[in-house]
Amino acid sequence: MLQQHFIGSHLVLNQVKKLILPESYCMELFYRKFGNEGGQPLIILHGLFGISDNWVTFARRIAMEGFE
């Protein structure tokens, strides 16, 4: 699939590839949930050497803005 978007006046084309893995490649991911049920969802993925504790202060603040 080819996606296109503009940065300033420049057209940028991105090749989007979809990777489909068999079920045997599935894994459980740890997550934290903040906010009230029914709020607009916001998902944050931290980097390789980051930890979710680094995002707790931000998550509490953004939950007060109506995100879940």
Image: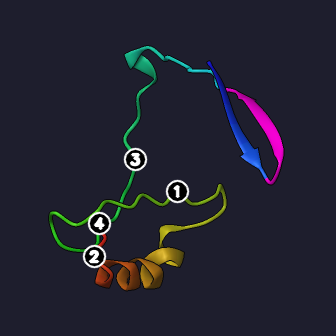
Q: Quadrant of the N terminus?
A: top right
Q: Amino acid at mark 4?
A: Lys
Residue hosting label 4 = 33
Residue hosting label 3 = 29
Q: Quadrant of residue 57?
A: bottom left
Badge 4 or badge 2: first in the primary sequence: 4
> Which of the two marks, 1 or 2, is nearer to us in this view?
2
The stretch in magenta equals 8-15
Q: Residue at x 39, y 85 (%)?
A: 61
Task: Give the CA distance from mark 3 to mark 1.
Answer: 11 Å
> Which of the two marks, 4 or 2, is nearer to us in this view?
2
66 to the left or right of 31:
left
Task: Give the CA distance from mark 1 to mark 2.
Answer: 19 Å
Task: Give the CA distance from mark 3 to mark 2.
Answer: 24 Å
**Secondary structure under the numbered disc 3 in the rendered image:** loop
**Secondary structure under the numbered disc 4 in the rendered image:** loop
Residue 19 point in image, percent of width and height? 56, 20
Q: Is residue 13 magenta?
A: yes
Residue hosting label 2 = 66
Q: Residue at x 15, y 66 (%)?
A: 37
Pointer 4 with pointer 1, Cβ within 8 A: no
Q: Amino acid at mark 1?
A: Leu
**Secondary structure under the numbered disc 2 in the rendered image:** loop
Badge 3 or badge 1: first in the primary sequence: 3
